[in-house]
Amino acid sequence: MMVNFKDMTRNVMAREKALYEGHPVAAVAAVSEAVASEALALIDVDYEVLPHVIDVDEAMKPDAPLLHDDMFTIGVDPAPKKSSNIAKRVEFGFGDLDAGFAKADVIVEREFTTKPVHQGYIEPHACVANVSEDGQAELWCTTQGQFIVRAFCSKLLGMEVSQLRVTASEIGGGFGGKTVVYLEPLALALSRKACQPVKMVMSRSEVFKASGPTSGARIWVKVGATKDGRITAGDALLKYQAGAFQGSPVQPGAMCAFAPYDLENVRIVGFDVVVNRPKVAAYRAPGGPIAEFAVESVMDEVAMTIGMDPVEFRLKNAAKEGTRAPYGPKFGPIGLVQTLEAAQAHENYKVPLKANQGRGVASGFWFNIGGETCASMNVGEDGSVALVVGTPDIGGSRASLSMMAAEELGISMEHIRPMVGDTSSLGFNFLTGGSRVTFSSGMAVVEAAREIISQLRERAAKIWEVSVDEVEWSQGHARFTGSGEAKSLSLAELAKTAGKTGGPIIGNAAINATGAGPSLATHLVDVEVDPETGKVTILRYTAIQDAGKAVHPSYVEGQMQGGAVQGIGWALNEEYIYDDNGHLENPGFLDYRIPVCSDVPMIDTVIVEVPNPNHPYGVRGVGETPIVPPMAAIANAVSHATGVRFTDLPMSPPRVLEALETNQSR
Amino acid sequence: MMVNFKDMTRNVMAREKALYEGHPVAAVAAVSEAVASEALALIDVDYEVLPHVIDVDEAMKPDAPLLHDDMFTIGVDPAPKKSSNIAKRVEFGFGDLDAGFAKADVIVEREFTTKPVHQGYIEPHACVANVSEDGQAELWCTTQGQFIVRAFCSKLLGMEVSQLRVTASEIGGGFGGKTVVYLEPLALALSRKACQPVKMVMSRSEVFKASGPTSGARIWVKVGATKDGRITAGDALLKYQAGAFQGSPVQPGAMCAFAPYDLENVRIVGFDVVVNRPKVAAYRAPGGPIAEFAVESVMDEVAMTIGMDPVEFRLKNAAKEGTRAPYGPKFGPIGLVQTLEAAQAHENYKVPLKANQGRGVASGFWFNIGGETCASMNVGEDGSVALVVGTPDIGGSRASLSMMAAEELGISMEHIRPMVGDTSSLGFNFLTGGSRVTFSSGMAVVEAAREIISQLRERAAKIWEVSVDEVEWSQGHARFTGSGEAKSLSLAELAKTAGKTGGPIIGNAAINATGAGPSLATHLVDVEVDPETGKVTILRYTAIQDAGKAVHPSYVEGQMQGGAVQGIGWALNEEYIYDDNGHLENPGFLDYRIPVCSDVPMIDTVIVEVPNPNHPYGVRGVGETPIVPPMAAIANAVSHATGVRFTDLPMSPPRVLEALETNQSR
């Protein structure tokens, strides 16, 4: 994880320039909110308004106002001599594009735009910090990674990491947006000055203005294919807003763009561009949905142009085990083909459509990650187990991790109490993100459980005075397998006498998990477009995904449904609306409209299981992939319903209506 | 640890009978203190007043009112057929008492009484409980043992231990009195009913009336010796108040009674007697100070009678390595002789005394314990270390444990942050008590640190691509010891790259610590008695003790000084005063007078170090022994100052005056 602390400290509190509306310029601690408000009112900030730029195209122009005078694009050769708003250029790919396009019977080339959208977690950022006079500090905050918060805050404040103990409170939603620090360093700095606890809570308006949404972007995609449906070349250009400091998710976006396809000639170029908006934060499969919205829209158009069923077209070109990913490595076993076959077989793919209705298909990819992870299991004196992990539970991971622990130990999961520990209770844990928790924490839990089983076998061997090789662990019992009388001792029995056999029974694991398996998905959606209002209604939605192994199937379904619903919001309604002066016009849930229950049908799900060979139970991360296909699937459906290709998000009623009217008037 | 849950639940809330003033009969939870008070006022309790008994002699009479109809004395043969207030008889000893006393030139025999005294912790009992609807519970409380609280409460409430997570808040004093539960099960039960957090705090008056002081007692001691100062026999009878439920510390008292002496003929008989007082709780070396007050007073009188210096007399009879303790085992290396020699050599033993002044000497013994203990050390990414132990810090153990960790790792202790973990973060830990923490948690910390060092050596070997046998750990660095270029890597350097060398670096230990070393002490005190008021002033006080190894000498001194001061209070002023109806007359710090700064001189200390061979640093527990000698030392000093032998505690001004007047009128 590359971290730019110079930028981080400036995002937490503006220094040379305030770079966006909402950029903090002062912090006040007081004995009450009323006193704090009065104190804030006494601070008179005199802003000199500088030229600003909020969109990538303008920001990339040679004469654009510069956010940072010292920013020189990295990833270009030769290195530029002039500073610009382009932080970084990335490129992936291989093959010969010209040769590929030359072989094509059909070429589709289009440009797309997306707007910044916010994760929309219900709980705003909030924290309580307490620094005592000896410098030892405590911090409670809503976060996806208490260890990351500790690392960031201790660095920003010049503390040793062990001086700071961070407890992740039960989270009210994160979706990637709670992987960074905003209030926490300020609260700690104020508490250090005051030697008093300091509490800070953002308002919803502050959440919108001062915390990171994901990038708005402009994407250009060109795909060539033969008449019989074989893709000959794919080319894409991604320009992502980073917000006020570098770090858009253009790189993972570029990794995802063509990843569902087995291509011979492919290129993706991406630009990370700073603009006068809040610095973007991760949002569920960061960068992926934007890239695949464009690519999967073009794929749909290619299939349509050659008259091929879009699922059939994808099956013909699908990435599978051994396919070289556009970003380099060869895939191990992956499940895209299985999701496409499940889509073909699904009844929702056969429902007849009526007037103004359309059906869309899109696939999606997310690579998933592993990383540093710890788990601790402590067997209580009655054989019940306290399971502590270092990854906040944002999607049911306490359940899935308990299930794996219970499976290993051979006991009922009711006897396991899973908890998220503070930073003192475990070694370093990377954050809850990258769909890594059930995979990585699961591996750590399994390792810790196996350490416990090894101890239990030793304890039983000691009690029976036999060799540990003659003791096996099965169904929650140590069992004597040597010749002579059968003997067994349950976990509870061994726990009760643990003091006499060597002390408490504990298991700990500290790993750097590798071998995360990509998860691929295919979504089907039927929409109806009201030609009079432009309103798009989702009629049916089917999310099909490879989970590797769905440890807790209903939570996996929940992830798939949640991702689809967030994607529906992104596709149809959500956007940051700025006025000409760079002020956000809709910083609240009344004007920034996320989907509510009545906006969506039941999201049907199909879980496909192609085991990840690198995990003891075959687990793949599942949380992020489901937000990758929806925008393209819906755009494709709307296009089929209306006969107009939609390339700009959101497809909100006024925009749809405008497009329909423009089309009719042509 | 034998626990009687039938009694425990009845002490927490009276069932068949309310057995003492302060015995809880109802609990109310409300949204505010005012509402709770109103609700309590609506509860009308109609007590039928039964005959009661508050002192051991009356309670042991055959016709005494019985507290429990089903209590039959254990430890007597044949088992009694009739129930009584005597819960238990214990006996230790060996040799032939009659033969021993027959050899004696001098025999001294006396009876003593002590009153119940309270630990006097400044913070009252307090807790917050929160049980959620799924039965998972959190409890924060002031305790010396969060794991014991978990064990007790889960048993009383029918929960699995892992369902309950207990956090020990920073303690405001315990001294043994916070090793039991009072409010905690009630708060949990109320919270379970209400599905709301419940907070309970005792008032000071409730602390006195409803939490356990230590026993009041009657003790009889008989010692015989030859003219040249060799003890020929020792006999003692201890009758200890248990309060309303069995469980006085008569057994440890009996173990301590003659333990400082190398005797051929010895017997100690003890009785555990229930009376209508609050159930006693542990108080620093529970039972020891009472027994040794009596024994060490008699020893002083024996030495005086044969005209021998009391230190010389003790040196002549001192227990040492190989001595058989009256309670059975042979001692390993112990430091009593060294404390006596240090007393002889101390300048305070030579200061000339004036009129109405007297000098007292007494020795004291406490066996100390080990027990189940865990420690967890997590190396942060900057090489600083989070150290988590499961034993609340009541006397500086975070410092001493950090020092041992730092010593092992070869880093400065400033890089270690010691913390007390909640019950989820470690395996089971026995409580902070028995002076076991620096010993037992120290052993666990050393084991965890050595696990870390072994990992650090492995990581360095991996980086250097050499055998781990060629890597040693010294002064905070892995060092290559093989042939070729010298190489070293610091802890911080290895921590920084831990992700690449296998994951976070952690060390965990879960042990059942054995081999605790007894700690012996000798105290010297000079007093002046005002013949007009009976007030005893402490002029000089010297506490000398074997610490095995004083890891943090000033905290060890603090323990010695604190024990001495509590002993001064016990000797001179503290007592529970009951009226004829069994009502406590002085339930507050105004009328129950604990020593304040102006009551005591600087307590001089001498630390003697006879290493405990069973601990890696030679540590012995030091916290309890210092309260064992003071009462006898002061009684001896007062006796020498006045010429009157004082056998009843406290030696408060009215009692001293009365004794002086009685003596003069003889």
Image: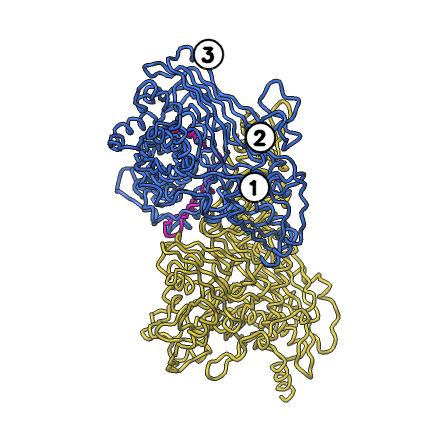
Chain colours: A yellow, B blue
Q: Which mark is residue B98?
A: 3
Q: Is residue B98 above or below residue A164?
A: above
Q: Chain of mark 1?
A: B
Q: Is residue A36 left or right of residue B636?
A: right
Q: Is residue A263 visible?
A: no
Query: Which quadrant, please, contains the N terminus of chain A?
Result: bottom left
Q: Is residue B312 visible?
A: yes
Q: Is residue B253 left or right of residue B344?
A: right
Q: Nearer the viewer, residue A438 or B145?
A: B145
Mark 2, mark 1: which one is toward the viewer?
Answer: 1
- Badge 3 crowding class, 10 Å Cα cut-off, few under 14, some 14 to 19, many 20 or more, is few
On the image, the x and y values in percent for residue A381 come to 57, 37
Q: Looking at the image, which residue sits at the far front? A: B665
Q: Are labels 1 and 3 assigned to the same chain?
A: yes
Q: Amino acid at mark 2?
A: Val
Query: Between disc 1 and disc 3, whose residue precedes?
Result: 3
Mark 2 — residue?
Answer: A471
Q: Nearer the viewer, residue B123 or B117?
A: B117
How far is the residue under mark 1 from the one under mark 3? 44 Å
Look at the image and say whether residue A618 sits in the magenta stretch. Answer: no
Q: Is residue A306 left or right of residue B579?
A: right
Tell me where the magenta segment starts and ends, as one range.
Answer: B363-390
Q: Is residue A626 above or below residue B475?
A: below
Q: Nearer the viewer, residue A418 or B606?
A: B606
Mark 3, mark 2: which one is toward the viewer?
Answer: 3
Q: Chain of mark 2?
A: A
Q: Are marks 1 and 3 in contact (CB under 8 Å)?
A: no
